[in-house]
Image (cartoon, rainbow, N blue to C red):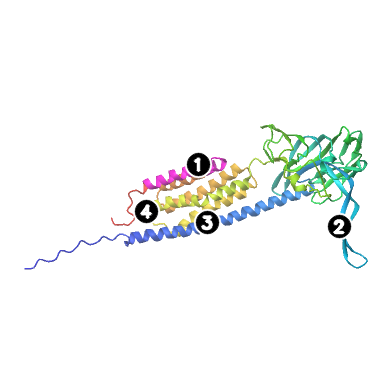
Amino acid sequence: METPPVLPPPIPATSNSPKAVSTGLKLFAIGALLGLLWLALLLVDSVRVERLGFRVQAEQEIAQTWGGEQLLAGPVLAVPFTYPAKTVREVADARGVPVRTEEIRTAKAWAYFLPSELDVSGRLAPSLRHRGIFTVPVYETQLAVRGRFRPAPASLGVDGALYDWTKGRIIVGLQFPRGLRSAPVVQWGEQAVTLEPGTPRDGWVDTLEAPVNATAALADGVGFSLEMTLQGSRRLAVAPVGAQNRVTLKSSWADPSFGGAALPARRTVGPEGFEATWEQSYFGRGYPQQWSDAAGQTAVAYQQIAASVVDVTLLQPVDAYRLVERAIKYGVLFLVLVFANFFLFEVTAKLRIHPLQYMMVGGALVLFFLGYLALSEFVAAGLAYGAAAAASTLLVTGYSASVLKTGRRCLVIGGAVAGTYGYLYFILQLEDYALLAGTAALFALLGVAMWVTRKIDWYGGR
């Protein structure tokens, strides 16, 4: 009698089991839903950009009526001069042969001199202006500008130059002259002159000019002083055009931002306001103390002077649009964490959650960002965040009561959503450590997910 052959044991169904296929399809569906919700987050961000554009438009409208971000450049002493200019041209002789000839003609140009000493001081009186639902910080300041001119025409190196010091002009560049409350008066030595709108100069913004006699400046120099009542919005910048500069600005605004080409040498910031003092010389400024617009000289452009300014900006305590932008960047991770909780309940408790139910939960989470954006335009950013988070948490928790079947699971989801909102708010308040805090939270959550799912048989073999 023949012994029947020994058959190998059957290979257990693993990846092809119905449970494994169902799990894979569900993960694919969840991934597709996350992609759709990501597009919804992009639409919310586009709404944020649109609303931000409306705020910029409101700022521009206020700038047109009150005064924009002011930039003070000057004063500059301009002196006309003449010099012999050599030209070469070809003329035909009696035989019609071209002959090169040199001609000397008298050319006219302007020489520009910057002050050797400059001291600018002012106190900004801030207030808020409203345009629709938007609020823009503005200020009024009494600026005092003092200094001394000691021009050195020899440094220009123009041979044969004849300067007409009696026809000098004092020039002050101002970004928004309409912000002046009255015509500024310059005390030039013993002479008082009133600044008036100047003639257009190549590359310069609107200028204020007045004629001065600069003859005395060649000897011991000439001192000057200027006071102006100026209106502006958000930012005030001062160009350090002196060889030695000192700029002192004060205000009762408690949230300043100091910028420009140099930071203050001394500053104090507190709830009562700020005081900042800049002290610097012309080294590293990027342009000389004197130049000409002709005679082979390189003229200094207004952009060079504007690039050397020191400034202070009146920041609003919380920029809601910036916080919403940062929150949206965490939106996809937020969706993944909540969906992961639902999926784990589905796997461990053998529940069946339809993709449409995932979509409902995801929609409630996306609406949080839109609600946060909408409320932040009317109430404080923290209150707007709390109200939007509470509404979204109640929606998700209430809907989970019918999806997850038991109150304990519903409370777990509600606690997870509320905790995630709380931690996200904590991250939004951080600046330097936001990335570290967010990364640490992700590591912790991934560790919890690994521990919870460590005994799950994903292939459904048993």
Which amino acid, by three-letter code, is at mark 2? Val
Q: CA distance from mark 2 to mark 1?
A: 72 Å
Per the image, the residue denoted by label 2 is 88
Number of the front mark, 2 or 1:
2
As displayed, is residue 369 above or below residue 11?
Answer: above
Binning the other alpha carbons within 10 Å of mark 2 as few (below 14), some (14 to 19) or many (20 upward) gives few
Instruction: Tell me residue 59's x, y (percent).
Output: 72, 48
Q: Give the quadrant of the N terminus.
A: bottom left
The residue that label 3 is drawn on is 38
The residue type indicated by label 1 comes to Ala
Report the residue that reaches farthest toward the front: 95
Disc 4 target residue: 347
Question: Which is nearer the N-term, disc 4 or disc 3?
Answer: 3
Instruction: List x then y, in percent, for residue 365.
Output: 52, 51
Residue found 57% across the figure and 56% down from its top: 42
Whether residues under marks 4 and 3 lie with C-beta atoms below 8 angstroms apart, the answer is: no
Marks 4 and 2, the one that precedes in the sequence: 2
Which of 199/409 is in front?
199
- The first of marks 3 and 1 along the sequence is 3
Pick whichever of labels 2 and 3 is earlier in the sequence.
3
Please give the label number shown on residue 437.
1
Residue 7, located in which quarter of the rendered image? bottom left
Q: Secondary structure at mark 4?
A: helix
Q: Which residues are magenta?
A: 422-451
Dot 3 falls on a residue whose secondary structure is helix
Amino acid, disc 3: Trp
Inter-mark Cα distance, 3 to 1: 23 Å
Q: Is residue 325 left or right of residue 262?
A: left
